[in-house]
Amino acid sequence: MVKTVVKKYQVYDYNDLKNNDELFYKCYENWLSNSDNINCFSDENINSFTRFAEKLNMKIDYSLSNTEYPDRNCHITLKPDYSLDNNDMQEILKNYKGNGYYICDILKDFTLELLNKGNYKYLCEWNTNNLVLKIQNKMFDLWFKDNQDYFSKENFLQLVECNEYEFYENGNIAY
């Protein structure tokens, strides 16, 4: 004889999470602690950095975490393959679109703004290195700002609403 056991579970949706802080935080903390949960735009971000570096004839080396904040192993390093020239860089970036992702526009505008400032009008070795350092620091900041936005409470709620996620009382997603 075969017995079938049916167990009912209460599931909670977006509206429940919005109206119950305790449930929201339990679900949010479970979502944050899931090791498979990474920023879905991380590949796009890396691709944007790589294309930008290649466009300016630079090599890029990086080690980045998929967390909100950097650890001591995180870095982005840009190494120009040649002596950069202000006019050439401005011409290269004038119509630069990259891969069409918003980070490409931010890097383009940031670099053009630096090139138009006094210390970078005429590039020499010391300020070329400084310019490259500022660009790689901007990339680093953009990476972790994007991760902070992705792992924010607001984004979590948007993901729950858009994907119609439901949760068990213990905070786990009901698949």
Image (spheres, rainbow, N blue to C red):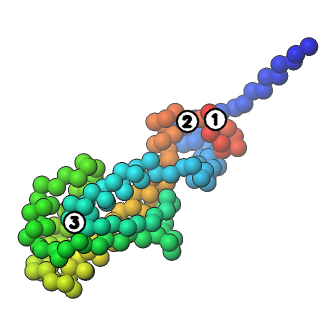
Q: Considering only vertical position in the picture, is 152 above or below 134?
A: above
Task: Report x, y in % for residue 98.
Answer: 23, 53
Q: Earlier in the sequence, mark 1 or mark 2?
A: 2
> Position of 143 compared to 133: left or right?
right
Could you give the CA–CA distance between mark 1 and mark 2, rounded to whole angstroms? 7 Å
Please determine whether, in this image, residue 131 is positioned above or below residue 30: below
Does residue 15 show up? Answer: no
The answer for how far apart the CA atoms under marks 2 and 3 are is 44 Å
Residue 83 position in % (x across, y down): 17, 77
Amino acid type of the residue that numbered disc 2 sits on in the rendered structure: Tyr
Nearest the camera: 154 or 19?
154
Question: How far is the residue under mark 1 from the one under mark 3?
Answer: 48 Å
**Amino acid bearing label 3:** Asn
Q: Which residue is located at x 12 percent, y 74 percent?
A: 85
Taking the spot 19% from the left edge, 84% from the top edge, the residue there is: 125
Quadrant of residue 113 in the image?
bottom left
Image quadrant for the C terminus?
top right
Of the numbered discs in the image, which one, if any, rests on residue 57?
3
103 horizontally vs 151: left or right: left
Q: What is the number of the mark on residue 174? A: 1
Between circles 1 and 3, the one closer to the viewer is 3
Q: Residues within 10 Å of mark 2 (few under 14, many from 20)?
A: some
Q: Which quadrant would residue 127 be assigned to in this image?
A: bottom left
Report the front residue among 60 and 45: 60
Q: Secondary structure at mark 2?
A: loop
Residue 165 image label: 2
Indicate which disc, 1 or 3, sits on the residue closer to the N terminus.
3
Count of residue discs = 3
